[in-house]
Image: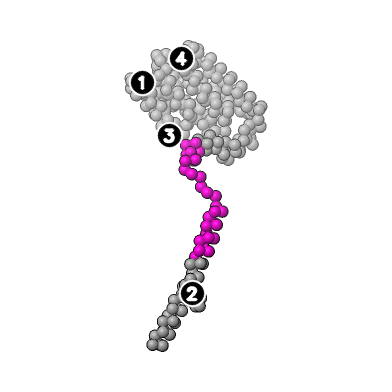
Amino acid sequence: MFYSDSSSFTLRCALRTLRGCPVGATRNRQPAANAADRSNNASNRNDLPMPLPTSTRSLPMELIRKFLFSPTVSILPLPGHREKWISGLGGAIGIALTFLVSHQVLGNQFALLVVASMGASAVLLYAAPHSVFSSPWAVIGGHVVSALSGVLVALFVPDPLIATPLAVGCAITAMYYLNCIHPPGGATAFVAVMGGPAIRALGFGYAIFPIMLNASIMVAVAVVFNRLLRSRQEAHVREVEAH
């Protein structure tokens, strides 16, 4: 009987040792330790910031805020006042010359349609001369390829509802393959289909005169004005291109 009691005591001691309890500790102390741990964990959780309730967070507004006020907008440097005014003056002169050429070829009504795509090119050429979309090949090649795509689609697709999106899509694909992507070229392809009888009567000549001539004038004026800006904008261009 004494042997069995000793064995039981030894076994209980071994189990308590494996559990990390002192040999002489009683079972009443373990809940107290657990309670202390729970109290410490609760105090640590109280130190952490509580998440906002779902009802107070607006996901659409957060997305709009990030889109409108992206950090890259404030990081990119802006040119000085002199460069801004010269860019605006260059764009005005370039559009004036292209409108004069288009007016001589198409008349006042249809010249407005052609100059519209050149107006978009003016923003790139004079406000963002460092962009890959503003290179001479991108501007001239993009407009000419888009004009040819629009005229070609208009010849084989009589329905303008089908021809217009098809012309713009073909122009984008052609600019990709020829490495002359110029976003305003989409408007040039659009006008080739929807520009009316005066533009359709030009046929493929629309791509040469007035489109290629206008694009060449825009690039020539941009080169002159950007040379004036280059000494002031070199640091600005390097920082923008680094992003």
The residue that appears at 36% across and 20% down in the rendered structure is: 160
Q: Locate residue 49 relative to residue 235 in the image: left or right.
A: left
- Residue at 46% in and 14% down: 110
Secondary structure found at label 3: helix
Q: CA distance from mark 3 to mark 4?
A: 30 Å
The reply to whether residue 224 is in sight is no
Q: Nearer the viewer, residue 203 or 89?
A: 89
The segment highlighted magenta reads 34-62
| Amino acid identity at mark 4 | Phe
Label 3 or label 2, whichever lies nearer to me, is: 2
Whether residue 33 is visible here, answered yes or no, is yes
Q: Nearer the viewer, residue 66 or 96?
A: 66
Distance CA(mark 2)–CA(mark 1): 92 Å
Label 1 amino acid? Answer: Pro
Label 2, secondary structure: give it.
loop
**First reached walking from the N terminus: tag 3 or tag 1:** 1
Q: Residue 112: x percent and y percent? A: 49, 16
Residue matched to label 3: 177
Secondary structure type for disc 4: helix
Q: Nearer the viewer, mark 3 or mark 1?
A: 1
Estimate the x, y position of residue 234 in percent, counting from the top left: 63, 35
Determine contact: label 3, label 1, CB under 8 Å. Answer: no
Residue tagged by mark 1? 160
Q: Residues within 10 Å of mark 3 (few under 14, many from 20)?
A: few
